[in-house]
Amino acid sequence: MNIDQLEALLSGKRLEPLIVGHIYDPKLMCVVRAANTDAILLSPDTIVKQRRLHPDIGLDEYYLLPDVIRYGMVAQEHAEQLIFCYHHHTDRRFLLVVEATIQGMLFAIAFRRTTPRQTKSILEGALLLRNHA
């Protein structure tokens, strides 16, 4: 993912999904059994939904997605879905939900800011797969 591709996706000029990161951990890939790739895609449809639900998330936040995926704490509440919780060094916290499709692709379906309380609540109902790096 480069900044120009991300800007094009966010502005609506890019109509195809963009790879925003990879899952390098084989243990996480085993959990998401439906996936036949380690690449996580962000679609234009998700951007439209995100703009409506979380207008505070912009280019600077989306550019953090590779770090969220690589270093974030990972939990699972539902089959074929991973939840990444990331605490940035600026003390901002983010939540990313990644889901495997029937076709075996991985899509980022939600990305938003979160709080320590919300993270704790997620962990109470989910299986912790990886601690925050």
Image (tube, rainbow, N blue to C red):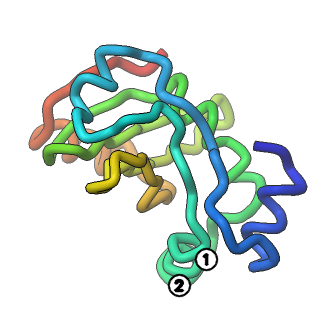
**Relative height, residue 30 to residue 82 (above, below):** above
Q: Is residue 113 left or right of residue 126?
A: right
Q: Is residue 130 left or right of residue 7?
A: left
Q: Position of residue 98 (x, y in %)?
A: 38, 48
Q: Badge 1: few (under 14), some or many (20 or more) residues near its Cα, within 10 Å?
A: few
Q: CA distance from mark 2 to mark 1?
A: 6 Å
Instruction: Give the amino acid at mark 1.
Output: Pro
Q: Which element is circle 2 on?
A: helix
The one nearer the camera, 61 or 99, is 99
**Relative height, residue 24 to residue 23 (above, below):** above
Q: Position of residue 64 (x, y in %)?
A: 67, 42
Q: Position of residue 23 (x, y in %)?
A: 47, 27
Instruction: Give the amino acid at mark 2.
Output: Arg
Marker disc for residue 102? none
Outermost bottom residue: 52
Q: Is residue 52 left or right of residue 32?
A: right
Q: Residue at x 33, y 53 (%)?
A: 103
Q: Residue at x 49, y 57 (%)?
A: 111
The residue that label 2 is drawn on is 52
The residue that label 1 is drawn on is 55
**Relative height, residue 31 to residue 16 (above, below):** above
Q: Position of residue 126 (x, y in %)?
A: 14, 38
Q: Residue at x 47, y 79 (%)?
A: 53
Can you tell which quarter of the image residue 110 is in? Answer: bottom left
The one nearer the camera, 43 or 121, is 43
Q: Is residue 108 left or right of residue 116?
A: right
Outermost right residue: 4
